Amino acid sequence: MSQFNNAETIPFVSLSPMHDEMRDEIDEAIKDVIDAEYYIGGKWNKTFCKAFADYLGTDYAIGVGNGLDALLLSLKAAGIGQGDEVILPANTFIATALAVSYAGATPVLVDPILDTYNIDPDQIEDKITDKTKAIMPVHLYGQPAQMDQIMDIASRHNLVVIEDTAQAHGAEYKGKKAGTFGDFGGFSFYPGKNLGALGDGGAVVTRDPEAAKKVAALGNYGSLQKYHHIYLGNNSRLDEMQAAVLTKKLAHLDQWNEDRKRIASRYLNEIKNPAIILPRVIEDADPVWHVFAIRTEHRDQLKAYLEEKGIMTNEHYPVPVHLQECYKDLGYKEGDFPNAEEISRTQLSLPMYYGMTDDQISRVIEALNEFENEA
């Protein structure tokens, strides 16, 4: 019998440990914004964008409204639109594909690698046509995609690369931060992200000064000078309150990511149940474990079993992009992307957040290892 039978519920995610530790910093930042009475494009926005670019080791970061807009504005800044095609993984959150659609282009899907969950670079070139203008790799769950191979393909075919880095703040591949390999990197600061705001927020990063200027204009009604509009732009700006909070949080990001790695290391080393397939970390990658995703043929049963033990989980994602109702016009059918479908059928995300205690981690591991008798 488990020593943890009467223990409290373990949430899938909790923001309380990080917020409790830095509550004074957050309160001070919010008070400063209120007192300054400057809520859009003020000093905190400039401070955060510079700090975030410096943290990533790139030249420019432009605050935008959310992660979807970060991808959309990157596409628009790259001149991608009607009649163009953009290659992306079939296993991703819907926002990746929606950005392409909102830009007027067509999403072209590629199956992921089964045990890393990321786009399979070996399948990309088969999808390139004379309409292909960009590749949009996703660093899913905080695990970097194989960017050296992707950048080589893009270079040989003269394609733009826009990294969807919504789940990989601080992740590295071959010593370089995710989001800084391509022409653009799109980040989300949704509250549950490794670096999360207290609401929606996002950023585009780039090394190109003209691209940075165009993204900034596109997110500000197409304007760099008030009432002078050079593009058909959007209203997508990182508001001052979120920029202030993110500035304070950024200083703690590496600490939070290290704690996620502590949890992931225990999961990877101590989960021994043969019915559970653990993720594979690619060579030269340093993931930040936004999500710790396992797979099992008994996903629904395991989910219910863990919930009975007070352990909350999630599914990322139960319906792959090509089988979503909104994308039936793309003409894909069941069986077109077998790995994406296998992941959607078998994937389960374990509790993963800064501040999980050793006892909580042990409870999750023990429950998973005992599941063999339930399967």
Image (cartoon, rainbow, N blue to C red):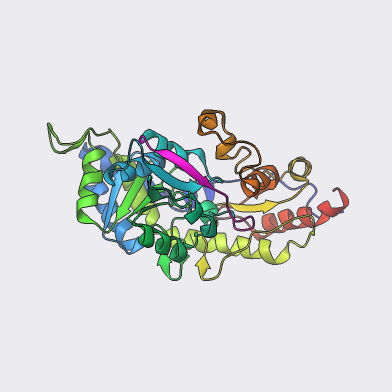
Q: In x, y percent, where is residue 236?
A: 30, 36
How many numbered marks does the figure carry? Answer: 0
The verdict on residue 196 being magenta is no
Q: Residue at x 49, y 62 (%)?
A: 146
Which sits in the foreground, 279 or 256? 279
Which sits in the foreground, 253 or 131? 131
Quadrant assignment for the N terminus: bottom right
Left or right position of 268 against 161: right
Q: In x, y percent, where is residue 134?
A: 38, 49
Which sits in the foreground, 11 or 88? 88
Q: Main secondary structure of the magenta part?
A: loop
The relative height of residue 299 versus residue 21 in the rendered view (above or below) is: above
The relative height of residue 57 versus residue 316 in the rendered view (above or below) is: below
Residue 336 location, quadrant: top right
Q: In x, y percent, where is residue 292?
A: 61, 54
Q: Is residue 334 visible?
A: yes
Q: In x, y percent, where is residue 220?
A: 23, 37
The relative height of residue 333 versus residue 263 in the rendered view (above or below) is: above
Q: Is residue 180 visible?
A: no
Left or right position of 57 against 46: right
The verdict on residue 107 being magenta is yes
Q: Which residues are magenta?
A: 103-116
